[in-house]
Amino acid sequence: MLSGSRLTAKTVTANQTVTLSASYTEDGITKSATKPVTVTAVKPSAPTGLQVKSQTASGGIVLGWTAVPGAESYKIYRAAGDAAAAVCGTSASVTFADSSAIPGVSYVYWVSAVNSAGESALSAASVSGIIPLAAPAGVTASSARTDGVAVTWSAVAGATHYRVSRATSATGAKTDLGAWQTGTAYVDASAVSGTE
């Protein structure tokens, strides 16, 4: 008759061989047994809670998600337009800053969890992020020509097109001039002489 059986175990890491021991009493005699067991790693589950925490020109697009038990690191996947998703970085924590994101380009992100057993599926939910374009700097206007007022500005990182607007005061209503253009100069031929 068995009585007082007891199993002793301990917390181990993946792919580690440990010895499990058990003691029990049979007919008043205490006996014990041991057995070596190799603990095999299991792939982690897919991350959840993926979100965009911030998106700025200085800090990039910052992502965050919920920690996955058993995960040793995470892979971040990114896609833009019709391109297939590709790894854009890895993280040992539950945040990642995509500093290579181009302002004005919309990206879609997924994340997976990784450990010694392999990689999980991608997060079921994706998130979209975009760094807003900066306002053009270095804007100048020159009326020293006969065909109108020449407006120039510095190129903006990530911008593909520009449009000039005009107002008679800093707080006045703005009127768009011409169509969207790729260049960084525009001549306002409709400007009235003597009007600021």
Image (cartoon, helix red, strand yellow):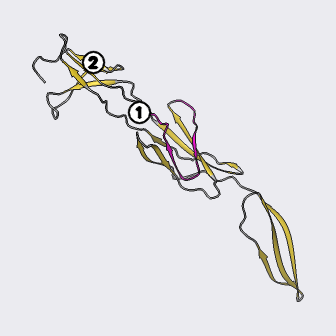
The residue lying at 73 percent from left, 64 percent from top is 12
Q: Position of residue 11 (x, y in %)?
A: 71, 67
Q: Which range of residues does the magenta coloring cover?
A: 82-103
Q: Secondary structure at mark 2?
A: strand
The residue lying at 47 percent from left, 46 percent from top is 62
Q: Amino acid at mark 1?
A: Gly
- Residue at mark 2: 186
Q: Amino acid at mark 2?
A: Tyr
The residue lying at 82 percent from left, 76 percent from top is 22
Decide if residue 166 is on the left or right side of residue 113: left
Which quadrant is home to the C terminus? Answer: top left
Q: Position of residue 169 (x, y in %)?
A: 14, 31
The residue lying at 71 percent from left, 55 percent from top is 42
- Closest to the camera, between mark 1 and mark 2, is 2
Q: Secondary structure at mark 1?
A: loop
Q: Quadrant of residue 138?
A: top left
- Disc 1 or 2, which lies upstream in sequence? 1
Decide if residue 28 is on the left or right side of residue 81: right
- Residue at mark 1: 104
70 versus 99 height, above or below: below
Numbered circle sitting on residue 160:
none
Q: Is residue 114 visible?
A: yes
13 versus 102 height, above or below: below
26 versus 71 height, above or below: below
